[in-house]
Amino acid sequence: MNLQFIADGLISGSLIGLGAIGITLTYSILRFSNFAHGDFMAWGAYGTLSVVAAIGALVGTTAPIGALSFGWPLILAAIIGMMLTACLALLLDWLLFARLRDRGQSIIVVMASFGASMALRSLLEFIFTSSPTYFSRGIQMAIPIGLGIRVTPDQMVMLATTIILVTGMHLFMQRSQTGREMRAYSQNPALARVVGIDTARVVRATWIIGAALACAAGVMVGILVQIRPLMGLDLLLPMFAAAILGGIGSVPGAVLGGLIIGLSEAAAVQLIGAEWRAAIAFAILMAVLLVRPMGLFGRAER
Amino acid sequence: MIDLLGYAAFFTSSALIFALITLGLNLQWGQTGLFNVGIAGFVAIGAYTSAILTTPEAADRIGGFDWPILAGWLAAALVTAAAAAFTGFATLRLKSDYLAITTFGVAVVVQLVALNAQGLTGGPFGVAFIPRPFASLQDQPALFNFINLGVIAAVTVAVYLALEHLSRSPWGRVLKALREDERAAISLGKSARSYRIQAFAAGGAVMGLAGAVQAHFIGFIAPNGYLPTLTFQVWAMLMVGGSGSNKGAILGSIVVWAIWVGAGAFSAAVVPGDWQARAASLQIVAIGVMLCLILLWRPQGFFGKRRG
């Protein structure tokens, strides 16, 4: 058996995990499963693409960095894109989710996220059409790294970026004051309010982090694969499955869940064929729900 | 004139098929509070079940059972109910979000099977030559259209009466009790999980039946008839009509379908050719925004009563 699937699975799994962090945080802190999360990814990717185009129009073409397919404009654009996506999430919360959350029926918020997801996705199709687009159309040579595995320079840098982002997120949640407040709020909102935690700040931080990471994941998918309005929808099920497999509320769990799903998908592509790839996340989801619904690192639900 | 009447019959038939799906969703969401984001998947299960069982032999897929249409419809309802019951069984002891995520997954997997399991579903080309009721009258289009409308209307009325009866029966009262005050209902010895699985399966059966009726109405099914857009449309229909009310579900379906068809015809007439695809996506944006606005301002819908 060709070991290439391990590299492919780790890379796609780390992107799923990055997206799943936002899902798991939204679920554990705002208490609803956000069906629009995948669309934050797509909007982030398209937002970044637009900023890259704007920078290109201002300064002309720039040389790519080393062996990579992109130069500094993409990095700058991705940072701006993350801010824009965070603004989009905050705007959506202000317009829609916050108002419904106040009424206290969490499933209504889920439905609203479903409607918002549909509107956001179709709006992208309206603006950019449904045909795929790319950050760069160049072809990269894959470098052999032993055991018959080949990776492109882009893939290596994306994997490294993901590791940095995830480690940073983990440290942020464990060490920083905001991270501690978020965890406290997710465990017991009433008690968190009693000890003087600013709820609005926690909610804001959750949206900003979730949306920024979704944008980062979307841009990386755009660099490694392609950008399409449906890219978020296609990753939604794997992301949900990763968040539940890892245990709702657990950042390391979401990433580990993402890696497991990425690896299983890559193995399935090799064993049973690429067309069944999307069923793997569902199979894992059902297995987790039937056997261990609290996931790997989760707490039992009441 | 006959053309216009024929079109009216066709339009009403399509709207009533949506009304059937919406009635199924109303049992799941309106009466029981179970969130289903995989409607398209359940409708597809029903459509494919009946199509495979009733079509004549085809070269490249399983088939040739040649069942009567009514038997196909019954099988469609039963198979979809079983799929819904299993979905409910796996998720209904957990928080409601898990059901939502799982139904979303069901729709993804059904779409995948429809596309890729060519030996079962015919793959991307779908299933053709699905027998239509009263096919012997096909050479008289006007009469044929009206007979089809009659069949679909009869099914809709039958399902409507059955659901009305169910919601007033002791079984329906338990569902209502569970929705209004779960703890009180459980303290009276009613198993919340078991009743919810039953309601989810029954709603699934109605959706499967609707899928089968639609398949036999059109005579042809393919995977791209069961995209998430279908799920959105049905949700919009129920929300406009007012969740909890069976009458509202039917009225909402007709209203939203009229808006949808009208908007489609309008954009086809006004929008230049190369912008048509984009205009179609704006139509979906409008439905999504409408769904959110209804949730914000009129959660009881236009025909529903405000819940206590």
Image (spheres, coloured by chain):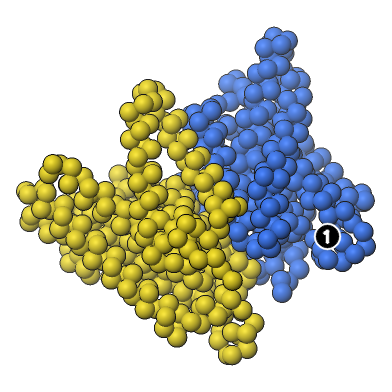
Chain colours: A blue, B yellow
Q: Position of residue A177 (x, y in %)?
A: 93, 51
Query: Can residue B38 be seen from the camera position used here?
Result: no
Q: Residue at x 26, y 66 (%)?
A: B155
Tally of numbered discs: 1
Instruction: Give the residue at x 61% y 61%.
Output: A107
Write down the chain letter for disc 1: A
Quadrant position of residue A187: bottom right
In this rendering, does residue B96 appear at all? yes
Circle 1 packing at 10 Å, graded few (<14), some (14-19), many (20+), is many
Looking at the picture, how far across and down is residue B194, in whole percent? 52, 80
Question: Where residue B146 sits: x, y (%)?
Answer: 15, 55
Q: Is residue B198 left or right of residue B101?
A: left
Q: Is residue B43 left or right of residue A283?
A: left
Amino acid under label 1?
Answer: Tyr
- Say which residue label 1 marks: A185
Element on which disc 1 rests: helix
* Left or right of B63 on screen, residue B166: right
Which residue is depicted at the point 54% across and 28% down? A127
Asked whether A105 or B225 is in front, the reply is: A105
User: At 51% from the left edge and 71% from the top edge, which residue is drawn?
Assistant: B32
Of B133 and A283, the residue lying toward us: B133
